[in-house]
Amino acid sequence: MTEERVIKIDPVTRLEGHGALTITLGKDGKVKDVQFNVTSTRFFEKFLEGRPMEEAPRIVPRICGICPIPHHLASVKAVEAAWGVTPPPAAIKLRRLLIEAKQLSSHAIHFYALAAPDFVFGPFAPPGVRNVAGVLKHLPDVAVQAIKLMQFGQELCRAVGAKAIHPTLGIPGGMLSPLSEDVRDEWLKQIPEMMENLQKTVDLAKKVVNDYIDVITKVAVTPTYYVGLTNNGVHDIYDGKVRVMNPDGKVEVDFDPQDYPKYVGEHVPNHSYATHIYYRPAGYPDGIWRANTLARCNVADKMATPMAQAALEEMRELVGRPSHHTFAYHYARVVEMVQAAENIQALLEDPEIVSTDVKLSDVEPRAGDGVGIVEAPRGTLIHNYECDENGYIVRANLIVATNNNIAGIEKSLMDAARFIFEQQGHKDLKLPDPIVKV
């Protein structure tokens, strides 16, 4: 090669958002640079300034059409932290039911619509077939079970949150309305079919992982730090402390939400509007971390439910702990789907889920600084609001899943690019026969 070569993919598809990929190869054919470019701006932190705090949970879900529920709940938790408010136990259970329903639905959409087509048809199948429409055409039974899982999660979100997208029922001090016994009973009737479709998904995922184990263990194996919520070491997506694990698998810290500025650093790269988040004590770029499914499965000592724990143990037998295998994110996604389903069933069977004591009546604005943290399907969300004595926001800081992951994405893309362009390793990969040949 006599001159530099630039490979540009714009826009990146199979992405729930907007971005572009730029790979620069030097004159020697080696990978000189890899950039994941995020070129959109949203300005939500500025939108919030000057608004009453109680409006924030209704505004911030618009940040993301995929994860509006986690943003809604992180926001309402931040307001409650600033005002010193603790909602009733039944309200917390309704919120947990809401976020678990979103977890199930989102993971099902991601697994079937974004990941499965490549594995079902093989990575070299024509792009016109290698998509969700191809799955619908060639594997209608699989497509039906995928749609039913997604629908179950989305419609349960609607039942609990009033709307499946951009919910409004979470308020400082609880939830606007309770879940009725009749509605709860209707959802309990659907549990057996949902669990059956989930088991079929687990079976498909195991086949994919075993078939593509050579790819998983060789491509984009990228050591980083990892971050995620745990509750006394147990996997949790609604509450707990934020755990940071280093690339060697040592837990560096479990910190309380309000202490995040001590541990969360933000680097502003020249090529992207999205900041790169890192573990502040380790510095940048050494402290680059990843969030999302694999990160949460790495940092957790165990899952919260029995079927999910069994699935996690099977996963760790294959890829270890911590797993640095980028393609293992798909396996971790299924582990979390299992836990979401088990949690949904347990919450629906809990008598307190239909309690009418779901909101406080004496919540008053006051000056404060509050932090709310939950896990979105794609990573940790941090909402931090400061308000004056009248409850008006004077400062807002939001750290979303993209920020937590983007530096790790670039790092894993660099490893994948070097594997392909420098090592030519892709030529020796053992690829299975596609599940469907086209």
Image (spheres, rainbow, N blue to C red):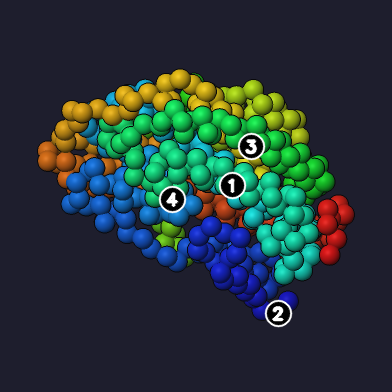
Q: Which of 34 and 141 is in front in this view?
A: 141
x 25%, y 52%: residue: 48
- The residue singled out by tag 3 in the image is 194
Contact, mark 4 vs mark 1 (Cβ under 8 Å): no
Residue 250 picture quarter: top right
- The residue singled out by tag 2 in the image is 2
C-alpha gap between disc 4 and disc 1: 13 Å
Counting residues from the start of the chain, the first of labels 1 and 2 encountered is 2
Q: Exactly how many numbered labels are in the figure?
A: 4
Q: Residue 165 carries which label?
A: 4
Q: Which of 277 and 28 is in front in this view?
A: 277
82 horizontally vs 145: left or right: left
Q: What residue type is labelled 4?
A: Ile
C-alpha gap between disc 3 and disc 4: 21 Å
Counting residues from the start of the chain, the first of labels 3 and 4 encountered is 4
C-alpha gap between disc 1 and disc 3: 10 Å
| SS class, disc 2 | loop
C-alpha gap between disc 1 and disc 2: 50 Å
On the image, the x and y values in percent for residue 350 come to 48, 21
Q: What residue type is labelled 3?
A: Met
| SS class, disc 4 | loop
**Quadrant where the N terminus lies?**
bottom right
Q: Residues within 10 Å of mark 4 (few under 14, many from 20)?
A: some
On the image, the x and y values in percent for residue 198 come to 67, 38
x 45%, y 40%: residue: 159
Counting residues from the start of the chain, the first of labels 2 and 4 encountered is 2
